[in-house]
Amino acid sequence: MCGIIGITSNKPVTSAIINSLRKLEYRGYDSAGVATLSNGFINEIKSEGRVDNLEKNLLNKKIEGTIGIGHVRWATHGIPNTVNAHPHSSETVSVVHNGIIENSTTLKKYLIKKGHKFKSQTDTEVIVHLITELLKENDLKNSILKMLKQLHGSFALGIIFKDQPDLIVGARRGSPLAVGYGPNENYLGSDSYALKSMTNKISYLNDGEFCIVKKNEVNFFDETGNKINKKVLELSSNEQDYEKGDFKHFMAKEIEEQPITLKNCIKEYIDSINNEISIHNFPWKNKEISSVVLIGCGTAYHSCMMAKYWFEELTTLDVSIDIASEFRYRNNRFKKDSLYIFVSQSGETADTYAALDLCNKNNMKTASIVNVIESSIARDSNFVLPIHCGPEIGVASTKAFLGQMLVLYLLILKLGIIRGDLKKVNYVEKIKDLKKLPKFVEDTLLTENKIQSVSSTFIKAKGSMFLGRGFSYPIALEGALKLKELLYVHAEGYPAGEMKHGPLALIEDGMPVVVLAPRDNYYKKTISNMQEVIARGAKVLLITNKSNDDVVSENIWQKIEVENTNEDLLPFLLTVPLQKLAYYSALKKGYDIDKPRNLAKSVTVE
């Protein structure tokens, strides 16, 4: 989603802001801009499109200053163009904003009556005029406090002031915001990744807090204006994971990294000598939990769906799943003996965070599974299980999805053995199989040549279907999502048994249909459903696991076989060809694979 950077220094900051904005490009955006202070004036340059366009404009019109803010925008209010790009400025202040101001229409009417004139279609410009109005009768701190009380919605803000040439104000409600510390300069950013190129010492703002950042000093305040202290966290300084290396795209690199990231995660959680899963400091006793609720969005929701099958197979816990954007607005019946598990790659997903916040306000047991342990969701959960994947830059999630499934599976196995739902011999056997998983994924990556050849058919089709049953159904949904994200065509995931209840009407002659049919308990039923779509003219790409038994059908268009392992782990292997299918289909179309249109990596608005 939108990205913020702010720098206050004793040297020019424009080039450093541009470099940091490039680090934020992976989030997804449609315009970019920079504003600096110099010689008592606010200098602003904005461009539609990529940061490259902004940099070209900066070459034509140099702007100086030792303090400045920058932004990459993902449009919410107002079409993507230069006028609606951030920053938004008056003669007095300049503002960058992530989030949505829900009462912007009401505030705008009030400010127009006060004589303010608006140039853009954005909700953000309301903040500019509101703080400008408040500064007429209040000092800086009180103006900020009054502004924050009047704004409804979610936001992360970076603000510079014409009459304050040495400071940036940051404020947070709902959207993430961090402060970075450097020698004779300090930073404001929506993303630790953007700040990491300049510093590895960071503090995070919590909801309702604001900060005043100067080059040699940072002060934090709560929502009442009282000064508060903040922990300074030291991040890893390893930068190599952020580079593409020899790969053309981050997504390609992240797909190929999956054997390594799975191996790293397994090492973190499994005691190989004793064949034991080590999940330390789990804060609840066995009898305190009788049900589990899994909550996520998008790909993370699919990992929750996968976990539901495992929970039902390996434990006697009651389990339900929910989409975060639905959960947060329903009249939920909270139960004291329920564990609420929140899954998010970034740990900043707005709807997932809001669902977590709702649970915390009702004193529920909360756990999170995230890739960023410094994130808001991780910090506000009672218990955190990181997926240890390293940075994922491509907008379409790959290695994080496998990481989420892996950690959920490890947690389920651990709960199964603790509760006595799983026999020790089965528990040990499943751990042994898990240790082989990275090698199986590595071998499955070798299906690449066949995937490349079949991708041409998906490019030419106006739509496709992905079918699976049982453990394969969530993977079918994820495969369809990947193709939608990258190829911009209609792709739908269905339970294979549901085809005859309506979706079969969509099958046309030559339509590509991916059938996930590993040799599990659902195999024969899935093959029957496959015959139904073949009979209607579909071109079936069958993805199954290796076996001596051949599928009895001479009408299968193409077949891909993944490695063989126990049924629990086959979803990991089935996922890999689907990732490759989406990647190579988009590659052949020449699309922007790491930054697909209209999408953002970290969805920090509703």
Image (spheres, rainbow, N blue to C red):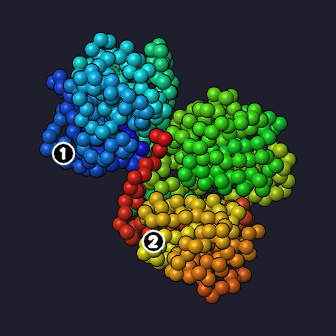
Indicate the position of residue 590 as horizontal and vertical percent values.
35, 66
Indicate the position of residue 154 as horizontal and vertical percent values.
46, 33
Q: Would residue 244 be found to the left or right of residue 433 on screen? A: left
Secondary structure at badge 2 equals loop
Indicate the position of residue 501 as horizontal and vertical percent values.
66, 68
In percent of the image, x 47 and y 15: which residue is there?
224
Within 10 Å of the Cα at label 1, are there few (<14), some (14-19), or many (20+) other Cα atoms? some
Indicate the position of residue 265 as horizontal and vertical percent values.
61, 50
Secondary structure at badge 1 equals helix
Residue of label 1: 57
Identify which amino acid the numbered label 1 is placed on. Asn
Name the one closer to the observer, 275 or 149: 149
- The earlier-in-sequence mark between 1 and 2 is 1
Within 10 Å of the Cα at label 2, are there few (<14), some (14-19), or many (20+) other Cα atoms? few
Residue of label 2: 462
Total residue callouts: 2
Q: Would residue 175 be found to the left or right of residue 410 on screen? A: left
